[in-house]
Amino acid sequence: MDVWNQRIFLAVVLMLCVGHVLAATDQDNLDGLLQTDHDRRVVSRDQLDSEDFEIGVSTGLINMADFGTSQVVRLRLAYHVTEDFFLEADYGQAELQETSFERLSGAARLLDDDQRDVTYYNASIGYKVFPGEMFVGSKYAFYGNGYVSLGAGNFHFADENHASFAIGAGFQLFPTDWLAIHIDLRNHVFEHDLLGETLTTQNLEATIGVSAFF
């Protein structure tokens, strides 16, 4: 009986020793797998400004039907309701050129200088389309998106107000997290009877400008 007890005791001791050796070997293998000589790279990501308001200025050209093409300056204020939709109010100024009739006939001018000053304002709703990144080389990427807009407003010139609506489209590029560059195309549609009959005119505008979020 003592012989069997000794054999059982030795077997238990042997099993414990083997288990300890195997556990130590597995831990060494695991440590070897987890260890690495590569340095961890720290990635810094720019975040777009989280503010919802945007104010900007732009300039370009507007073609006023029957009155030629003039320089226009426009101010805009936008509120971004969601990531996709925004509301916009804008105010523009331009100066009418002479009509083709005035230039070719040599007749008296239809409007004096003060009456040729144009001011307009619009209230619009916009929707952003095709958001994504634009890559410049292999190191720089900028966020950008297109947008479409629809609005209504008023044109004032020749001492008269003309109700209008505007259809627009544009592109917005973010060189920094708070600054945006805009390229904007619009068609202002309104009626007037300055040339003797009521006409529905299409007045195309193209501008480029910058805006800031706050």
Image (cartoon, rainbow, N blue to C red):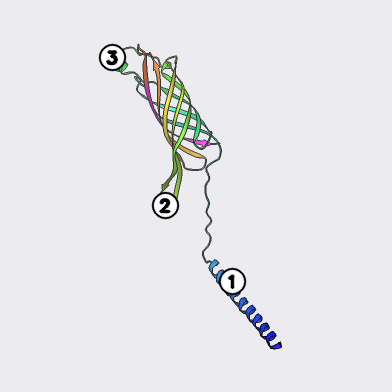
Q: Earlier in the sequence, mark 2 or mark 1?
A: 1
In the rendered image, the quadrant that contains the C terminus is: top right
194 or 96: nearer the eye?
Answer: 194
Disc on res. 82: none
Disc on res. 138: 2
Label 3 element class: helix
- State yes or no: residue 25 in magenta: no
63 or 172: nearer the eye?
Answer: 172
Q: Residue 110: where, in percent of width, then height?
A: 36, 13
- Amino acid type at image mark 2: Ser
Residue linked to disc 3:
105
In the rendered image, the quadrant that contains the N terminus is: bottom right
Would residue 63 be seen by someone viewing this image from the given angle?
no
Would residue 199 be seen by someone viewing this image from the given angle?
yes
Determine whether, in the image, residue 213 is placed left or right of residue 182.
right
Instruction: Work out whether 5 lies above or below 139.
Output: below
Where residue 200 sits, quadrant-wise, is top left
Query: Do the residues under discs 2 and 1 have CB atoms within 8 angstroms?
Result: no
- Amino acid type at image mark 3: Ser
For discs 2 and 1, the disc positioned in front in the rendered view: 1
Instruction: Work out whether 3 lies above or below 145.
Output: below
- Amino acid type at image mark 1: Gln
Give the magenta-colored segment's residue range: 202-214
Label 1 element class: helix
Q: Residue 157: where, in percent of width, then height?
A: 43, 17
In the current view of this chain or complex, which residue is farthest to the left? 104
Where residue 21 sits, quadrant-wise, is bottom right
Task: State the separation of the CA atoms marked 2 and 1.
Answer: 42 Å
Task: State the separation of the CA atoms marked 3 and 1.
Answer: 99 Å
Q: Earlier in the sequence, mark 3 or mark 2?
A: 3
In the current view of this chain or complex, which residue is farthest to the bottom? 3
At label 1, counting other C-alpha atoms closer than 10 Å, the crowd grade (few under 14, some 14-19, many 20 or more) is few
